[in-house]
Amino acid sequence: MTEALATGRGVLASDLVIHDHHAEDEDHHHGAPDDEGYWDVENVELTTVGIDIGSSTSHLMFARVHMQRLAQALSSRFVVVRREVLWRSPVTLTPYLPDNRIDAEALESFIHGAYAEAGIERPDVDTGAVILTGEALKRRNAQAIAELFADEGGRFVCASAGHHLEALMAAHGSGAVSLSRDGTVVLNVDIGGGTSKFALCRDGEVLGTAAVAVGGRLVAHEGRRLTRLEGPAEEVAAALGTSVVLGQELAPEVEQQLVARMTEVLLDLTAGGDGGELGRRLLVTEPLTALATVRPDVVTFSGGVAEYVYERERTDYGDLALALAGTVRAAVGAGRLGAEVVAPPEGIRATVIGASQFSVQVSGNTVSLSDESVLPMQNLPVLHPRVELATDIDPEEVAAAVRASAVRHGIEDAAAPVALSLTWDGEPLYRRLRDLADGLVTGLASWVRAGHPVVVLLDGDVGSSLGHILRDEVRVPGPVVCLDGLILHELDYVDIGELIRPAHVVPLVIKSLLFSADGAPERADVVTAGGG
């Protein structure tokens, strides 16, 4: 089963000594280590927790990850050799106060209870992540919820997942990205409580994402009396020429009309349209226009409503989820999606994530720091621009790739610093480096104007040269941090520590939102007209 799990590794490039933070502070330079010391050098075990707070439901998961250094001599890379899920919480409804704010105290009580039931103390957890998604992002106390974990320090990634990032995480966590690795075009539709997210995948990559305000908990009722009513549900009712009023009864026939109209919007967007007049009002991103030309071979569903689509859940929680899933299933049975529908390994838990991949692997010879006082920096989201750097470099193409990466992550407002991860190839010629520098600064213009540091992380050995060009020739007004010898990916977060002397190395903590590659959906698990 696909799990979003955390991994860890640690190498100091200057002396290639592994420092496992569980181990005693030993000096491995002198003589051969004993068996126990050797194990500590070659292995790292981490306990992680992932916490997902959504508009409808909240849940968490504890896991243990065993990392082992690659067998090649002097390798600085560690790989996952074993993952073990220690405990999964029940999926609970996200608690709300009467004024529709999330009840932070009740949520904290749930989390504390989960720790106690799992038999895990907070000091036992090495790292983890708390992610706010969907409608939860709009609540006035969303920041207060994230601050519940502030005392965990750098061990936790605390992030608000915008629509594009949530679609990206759902595609990875559900297993849709893994399913696409053989060239299959996969469309993952993550139907949550407040929004539905689309992610088009091929060759193990997400080609594009979109989101629309269609979800299973836009309406909630007790004994048919409406106790929750979100704006998008009112929009749908208005388009039907009817109305729904908080405190009044929701007639079953009106409920069916609502979910039928929502499903029509989803189907049009799945076909590459814009959802029509109603869909355009409900879209919270641009439509996924790539679907008009790149048609999926396979459609997968994730999110809470997916549990009903695949009939893994049948309980009616007094919202639209059960009825909405019914209309989606009917569309699938009628062949209206035009593609095979496959049940991925994960549905409602697709965005449960862990974090804690860490490494210290930067060569002191190629570190470029214009201002050491900017360090340390914590929890920088990593943007990975999709740009080819093997031949001539086009500054405009680089800038466009940087901006597109920011859009995918939903962090275009430049409110906080980011890190750019680049795959360098080809000769380190001045002209190429200068064109790259110009493109990066143009793409990061909003961040530069805001005074944030320009942070560039590369795999190739050009960090020092690029840093000098950014600082001395392009004249970036703020701090410049260029480090290399790193392999990073989208969905990573990084902590950058202070410069270590006399070794002149910079420690990096790479916190990855990693998903196992062995949990791709099985082709045999297909929803058919007969009911799945």
Image (tube, rainbow, N blue to C red):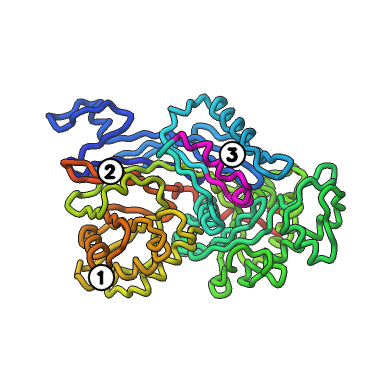
Q: What residue is shown with label 1? A: 434
**Callout 1 crowding tier (Cα within 10 Å): few <14, some 14–19, many ≥20:** some
Mark 3–mark 2 Cα distance, whole angstroms, equals 35 Å
Q: Disc 1 or 3, which lies upstream in sequence?
A: 3
Q: What residue is shown with label 3? A: 59
| Residue 209 horizontal/vertical position (percent) | 54, 63
Which label belongs to residue 498? 2
The type of residue carrying mark 2 is: Glu
Assign the magenta stretch its main secondary structure. helix
Mark 2–mark 1 Cα distance, whole angstroms, equals 27 Å
In the image, which residues are magenta? 131-152
* Depicted 108 relative to depicted 323: above or below: above
Horizontal side, residue 147 vs residue 71: left or right: right
Mark 1–mark 3 Cα distance, whole angstroms, equals 47 Å
Mark in the foreground, 1 or 3: 1
Residue 31: within the magenta?
no
| Residue 232 horizontal/vertical position (percent) | 72, 59
CB atoms at circles 1 and 3 under 8 Å apart?
A: no
Residue found 15% across the figure and 33% down from its top: 29
Residue found 69% across the figure and 49% down from its top: 308
Q: Disc 3 or 2, which lies upstream in sequence?
A: 3
Horizontal side, residue 105 vs residue 466: left or right: right
Is residue 73 visible to the viewer in this orientation of the structure?
Answer: no
| Residue 75 horizontal/vertical position (percent) | 23, 45
The type of residue carrying mark 3 is: His
